[in-house]
Image: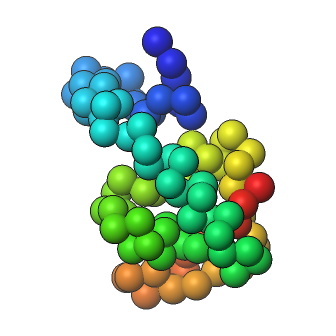
Amino acid sequence: MSTFPDAPGHRRADTSIAAANALVPKLGRAPPMALAASRGTGGHGLTADELAARLDLDRSTIQPRTSELRRKGLIRDSGHRRPNATGKQAIVWIAG
């Protein structure tokens, strides 16, 4: 069995494990799509909200993928921040 960041993370509670396992078949394309979208922005980068909008996916699907890609060293925090949908400052992610 794979563990984070190669598989959805969980909090070691039965409900969290079940939720993570239910995501596995749905997530096959999300990390590569997120990485490709991040690479396509150059130094401008994308926040999780911007990435979700670009890929036409829910932010709750994309946010964990950014954590996975960061842990794998495929994207990194640019050091820049932009407001997200709630008006709070969000990390701007750039490729690798």
Residue 81 drawn at (x, y percent):
64, 80
Residue 92 drawn at (x, y percent):
63, 73
User: Is there any visible trace of residue 75 in the rendered image?
Assistant: yes
Residue 75 drawn at (x, y percent):
69, 55
Left or right: 55 in relation to 66: left
User: Is there any visible trace of residue 49 in the rendered image?
Assistant: no
Return the residue found at the far top. Answer: 1
Q: In which quarter of the image is the C terminus?
A: bottom right
Compared with 42, 4 (above or below) is above
| Color encoding of the figure | rainbow
Picture quadrant of residue 15: top left
Q: Which residue is drawn at 47% across and 76% down?
A: 50
Picture quadrant of residue 5: top right
Left or right: 67 in relation to 87: right
Q: Residue at x 31, y 39 (%)?
A: 26
- Marks counted in the figure total 0
Residue 20 drawn at (x, y percent):
33, 31
**Residue nearest the viewer, comparing 26 with 77:** 26
Q: Which residue is drawn at 44% across and 49% down?
A: 30
Q: Residue at x 71, y 49 (%)?
A: 74
